[in-house]
Amino acid sequence: MAQGAFTGEAQQKAWTQWVRSALWEGDLDRVIRAFQEYAGHACAGEAASKAVTYFTNNRHRMDYPTYRARGYQIGSGTIESGCKRIATQRLKVAGAIWNEENAVTTAKARSALLSGQWEAITARREHSSRPLAA
């Protein structure tokens, strides 16, 4: 969006950093107003309008100061890495054909193993008649 609104690279970087700082501080109203200012712009209008819609619809998910205070992850990197390690590396092997139930069971088992909880979970399972996949 900044590339369409500003011709100079320094202006683009400054505006982008300003918006990131406002997001980090949890000031979504300021972020939305910043994009609204460019919604009618010839080059940045469509991107700005989409950003206004996105931030307005997802503001309840963007309370970053609270999330940081509670120690929550903000970026998607942790989740993406988990998906890769738990699912992709095990389920996407040559010639494998999975039904949903078996894929879920395998993902749960791999998650327990990789998180260091295998022993605790298998010990609980030995004392339960309920299957792991339930």
Image: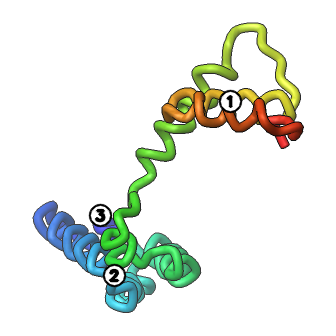
> Looking at this rendering, what residue extends furthest in the left direction?
10
Residue 49 appears in the figure: no
Which sits in the foreground, 125 or 93? 125
Residue 95 vertical position relative to residue 105 in the rendered view, above or below: above
Residue at coordinates 44% horizontally, 86% vertically from top-left? 40
Residue flagged by tag 2: what amino acid is it?
Answer: Gly
Residue flagged by tag 1: what amino acid is it?
Answer: Thr
Which sits in the foreground, 120 or 10? 120
Judge left or right: residue 89 versus residue 99.
left
Residue 17 appears in the figure: yes
Crowd around label 1: few <14 · some 14–19 · many ≥20 (10 Å)? some
Judge left or right: residue 101 versus residue 88.
right
Q: Secondary structure at mark 2?
A: loop
What residue is shown with label 3? 3
What residue is shown with label 1? 122
Which sits in the foreground, 111 or 15? 111
Crowd around label 2: few <14 · some 14–19 · many ≥20 (10 Å)? some
Closer to the N terminus: mark 1 or mark 2?
2
Crowd around label 3: few <14 · some 14–19 · many ≥20 (10 Å)? some
Residue at coordinates 77% horizontally, 30% vertically from top-left? 126
Q: CA distance from mark 1 to mark 3?
A: 54 Å
Q: Nearer the viewer, mark 1 or mark 3?
A: 1
> Looking at this rendering, what residue extends furthest in the front direction?
127
Q: Quadrant of the N terminus?
A: bottom left
Residue at coordinates 39% horizontally, 71% vertically from top-left? 67
Q: Quadrant of residue 98?
A: top right
What residue is shown with label 2? 26
